[in-house]
Image (tube, grey):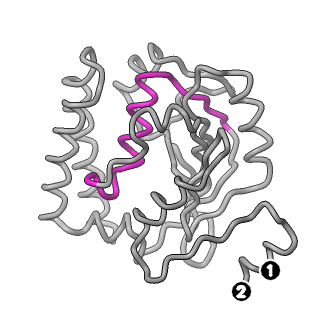
Amino acid sequence: AIIERFQRQYPFIKLIRHETNQGVETAVKTALGHTTGDLLLFAAADDFVLPYLFAHAVPAMRDNPAAAFFCSEVVVVDEAGSIIGFRPVTIPRSTAGYVSPAEVRHAIRNSDNWFIGTSVIYRRDLLAEIGFFDRSLAVLQDAMATRLLAFRHGFYFAPNVLATWRLIPGSLSVRSSLLIDDNEKLLYKAKVWIETHFPADIKDEYGRLFDRRLRFNFARSRLVW
């Protein structure tokens, strides 16, 4: 009912229904089949964007045609809406601008958790070039896509808080991080995917880094939750 009310006010909104709930992955795949725009944002149901996200992203992507996607800082809030932090903790650059593939290769040795999904706006043709998202990677689909695109094309980063990430106990990312057996399978899938898809000059080094960092994140989540 809420969506239909917005549709009456904004005719460009399109509501696409599945007869039964088929999950997020199928919903995204269905939506991609209906998209016509050059830029794509995948908005999670429990997150929201802030004013001026698109006002920053659209000209940035227009003026930096090499960038595969736009991303920004986000504010992290809890279930009650209270601010509990900001991400990324380590930003790839202190001023707004393009981060080239060469710069990605250099900076990623120290940190790589720059791409918070709520703020990521993809260039459709380059996302399509890698097959959009690989469903076999489950919760790592967007993480692998952004990293592969960053190594191939670079990205644009804005050090402005332009989106919100709600971190709650029942979220998919938290639930997934607590399943130890599933985590080991996911780590193996990520290892194979990096070996298969990432550029030859970086895949071995980055594969080891990603594995270590993801294991740390899983362990931290189990301590927190």
Q: Residue shown at 80%/74% (left/top)?
A: 6
Residue 67 percent across, percent down from the top left: 58, 25
- Left or right: residue 201 versus residue 188 is right
The residue range painted magenta reads 136-159
Q: Residue shown at 40%/62% (left/top)?
A: 25
Q: Tell me which corner region of the image, top left, top right, bottom left or bottom right, holds residue 72.
A: top right
Dot 2: what SS? loop
Q: Residue shown at 73%/56% (left/top)?
A: 50
Dot 1: what SS? helix
* Kind of residue indicated by mark 1: Arg
User: Which quarter shows the N terminus?
Assistant: bottom right
Q: Is residue 210 above or below residue 86?
A: above
Q: Which mark is residue 117?
A: none
Residue 103 percent across, percent down from the top left: 47, 16
Q: Residue shown at 34%/67% (left/top)?
A: 224
- Does residue 175 belong to the magenta stretch? no
Q: Residues within 10 Å of mark 1 (few under 14, many from 20)?
A: few
- Left or right: residue 34 versus residue 223 is right
From the image, tell me which residue sits under label 2.
1
Given contact means CB atoms under 8 Å apart, are the residues at marks 2 and 1 in contact?
A: yes
- Left or right: residue 204 versus residue 217 is left
User: Which quarter shows the C terminus?
Assistant: bottom left
* Kind of residue indicated by mark 2: Ala
Q: Which mark is residue 5?
A: 1
Q: CA distance from mark 2 to mark 1?
A: 6 Å
- Does residue 155 belong to the magenta stretch? yes
